[in-house]
Image: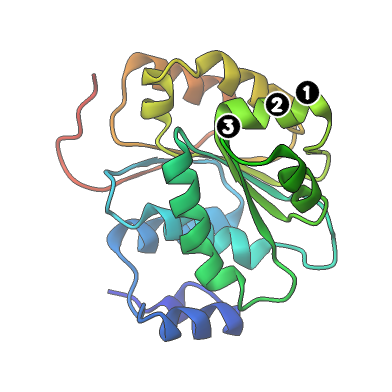
């Protein structure tokens, strides 16, 4: 098992991880971090609890350009609970880095406060419906976006968000990195993969993941 110091180079990230008690990456983190840092598209197959939030979040934070006050990463989650959880986990590390602001956007929260927060966001974590709301209002600007993450993509499809996902992906810049995580691989996920991921590297954790 490698150490985080063998995967990441940002000293502030490593110090924050150590402070939180994280010294060794999980399997999904060890395999995913180098792929994401390389800039390749990635399809991750892993179940909840495998550590996938840090698997995509840590390399994204490391690659953020702190000199640009624009949204550089968009993480799409199926529920407000997951969006909140992802935000809290990544803030444990991002708060130790200079000017890396993570903003969650989901329904049930004050729109005006979200609009104000988005003006200085570098990473946005949100649910499909609220992301679509902000895109429609032009309060979420993706012209400088570098990476898009679909977290628990199978759950989003099960909840009927396919049209929103496709609209969000089409609103993103053409040249960007795409990352998708899914516990199962039904046909619709395979279709999304072929549509939006270019020559993706597949990282699979755990044998016998359902394909339906």
For the residue pair 198 and 16, the one nearer the viewer reads as 16
Circle 1 sits in a helix, a strand or a loop, which is it? helix
Q: Position of residue 102 (x, y in %)?
A: 64, 57
Q: Position of residue 137 (x, y in %)?
A: 81, 27
Q: CA distance from mark 1 to mark 3?
A: 27 Å
The residue at 84%/31% (across/down) is 138
Quadrant of the frame with the N terminus: bottom left
| 161 lies left or right of 47 | right
Q: Which residue is mark 2?
A: 133
Q: Is residue 73 left or right of residue 58?
A: right
Considering only vertical position in the picture, is 162 above or below 62?
above
Above or below — where is 160 with respect to 57? above
Q: Nearer the viewer, mark 3 or mark 2?
A: 2
> Is label 1 in contact with label 2 (beta carbons under 8 Å)?
yes
Task: Tell me the CA gap for discs 1 and 2.
Answer: 5 Å
Which residue is painted at 52% across and 74% down in the image? Answer: 8
Identify the residue at horizontal 56%, vertical 20% (top origin).
195
Which of the two labelled residues, at mark 3 and mark 2, occupies the earlier sequence position? Answer: 2
Residue 24 drawn at (x, y percent): 32, 76
The crowding category of the residue bearing disc 2, from other C-alpha atoms within 10 Å (few below 14, some 14 to 19, many at least 20), is some
In this view, 174 is above or below 46? above
Identify the mark nearer the N-term, 1 or 3. 1
Callout 3 secondary element: loop
Near-viewer residue (206 or 143): 143
Q: Position of residue 158 (x, y in %)?
A: 36, 19
Mark 1: give few (<14), some (14-19) or many (20+) Cα within 10 Å.
few
Name the residue carrying label 3.
198
Q: In the rendered view of the protein, which quadrant contains the C terminus?
A: top left
Which numbered marker is on residue 136? 1
């Amino acid at each position: 098992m490698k150490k985080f110091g063998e995967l990441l180079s940002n000293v502030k990230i490593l110090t924050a991880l150590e402070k939180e008690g994280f010294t060794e990456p999980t399997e999904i983190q060890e395999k995913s971090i180098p792929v994401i840092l390389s800039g390749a598209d990635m399809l991750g197959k892993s179940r909840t609890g495998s550590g996938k939030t840090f698997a995509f979040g840590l390399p994204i934070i490391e690659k953020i350009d702190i000199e640009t006050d624009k949204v550089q990463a968009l993480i799409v989650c199926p529920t407000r609970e997951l969006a909140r959880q992802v935000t809290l986990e990544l803030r444990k590390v991002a708060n130790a880095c200079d000017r890396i602001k993570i903003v969650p956007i989901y329904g049930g929260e004050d729109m005006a406060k979200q609009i104000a927060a988005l003006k200085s966001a570098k990473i946005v974590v949100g649910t499909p419906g609220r992301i679509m709301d902000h895109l429609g209002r032009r309060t979420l600007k993706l012209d400088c976006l570098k990476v898009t993450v679909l977290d628990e993509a199978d759950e989003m499809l099960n909840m009927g968000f396919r049209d929103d996902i496709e609209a969000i992906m089409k609103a993103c810049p053409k040249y960007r990195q795409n990352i998708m995580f899914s516990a199962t691989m039904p046909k619709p996920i395979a279709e999304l993969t072929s549509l939006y991921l270019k020559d993706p590297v597949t990282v699979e954790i755990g044998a016998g993941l359902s394909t339906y």
